[in-house]
Each structure stands twice: as structure tokens, then as C-alpha cells.
Image: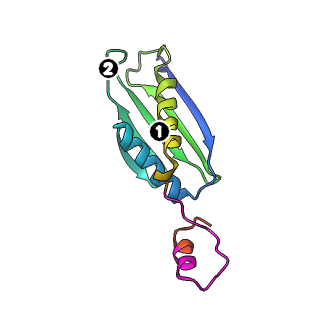
Amino acid sequence: MTIPASYSETRKYDHTKIALSDAVSKALESIGWEFEFVDPDFFIGKIPRSIWSWGENFEIHIEENGNIRMLSICSFRSTIISWGKNKRNVRIFFSALDENPSKILLIPVTLPDRNSPQHFLSAAYSDK
């Protein structure tokens, strides 16, 4: 049994899990990769094959502390060298995520006026 080639990277973001989940979804849509939600903080998907590879699968985990971890792994189990393709996939994803901060749904977690309607909205979407 061989372990297929893979690459994983983790980056830290200072946003709520719901905002990060929305940002991840938008980044994947902008790249054009097929994906599905396993749950709001776990995504899986497939990167189409190209002339350079037979395609890759990926997993993205959003952790409680704001870390986003992406794993790209070759689709064919017999592939032991990806020639940097998995690393490029991870970098493409994080570039799309970081490229346009205005695409990230920023939800304020704390507001000075606790009686304002915005406070109740932010509390409803807060992970805390």
C-alpha cells in the first residue's frame, strides 16, 4: 500500500467561524473547484485533472481558534510524487481567500451599545 502525495498548510485568521466558513465558500467558488460542506467548518472537494495531474482531492477544516487548515492529496493512490501540484493547490486556495478581504463577511462580535439591533444580530452569529 502506498500513501499518495499530499501537502497541508494552516493559517490563522481573526474572524468568527461563520465568517470564515462564508469566506472559504466564496474563495472555492471563485477558483471554480467542486466542493461540498460536510458541516459548516469542514469542506471536501475535488480539483479537476489537467495536463499536469490526474486531479486532487482536498479537505478544509476551520478550527475553533480561527485556524484554517487545507490538505491537498493526489486522487490516484499510486501517486507518490506530485511535483509540487498539491502545494500549488494549497497556495491557490489561500491566495483566493486572502485576495479580496471585502468578500469576507465581517460580523462584529462586540459592540459598545448592548441595546442596539446590531448587537443582537452580531450575538446571533457569534461563535462565542
Residue 72: percent from left, percent from top: 47, 30
Residue farthest toward the right in the current orientation of the protein: 112
Earlier sequence position, callout 1 versus callout 2: 2
In the rendered view, tell whether residue 41 sits above or below residue 88.
Answer: below
At 41% from the left and 20% from the top, the residue drawn is 77
Residue type highlighted by circle 2: Ser
Toward the viewer: 31 or 76? 31
Residue type highlighted by circle 1: Ala
Q: Secondary structure at mark 2?
A: loop
Magenta-drawn stretch contains 56:
no
Residue 109: percent from left, percent from top: 61, 68
CA–CA distance between discs 1 and 2?
20 Å
Q: Is residue 39 left or right of residue 109?
A: left
Q: Main secondary structure of the magenta part?
A: loop
Which image quarter: residue 110?
Answer: bottom right
Q: Which residues are magenta?
A: 105-121
Toward the viewer: 111 or 124? 111
At 33% from the left and 37% from the top, the residue drawn is 32
If the image is split into quadrants, where does the C terminus sit? bottom right
Residue 69: percent from left, percent from top: 56, 40
Q: Is residue 115 left or right of residue 5?
A: right
Q: Secondary structure at mark 1?
A: helix
* Residue holding disc 1: 96
Q: Circle 1: is it few (<14), some (14-19), or many (20+) Cα within 10 Å?
A: some
At 46% from the left and 27% from the top, the residue drawn is 73
Residue 117: percent from left, percent from top: 53, 82
Q: Which mark is residue 50?
A: 2
Magenta-drawn stretch contains 106:
yes
Frontmost of labels 1 and 2 is: 1
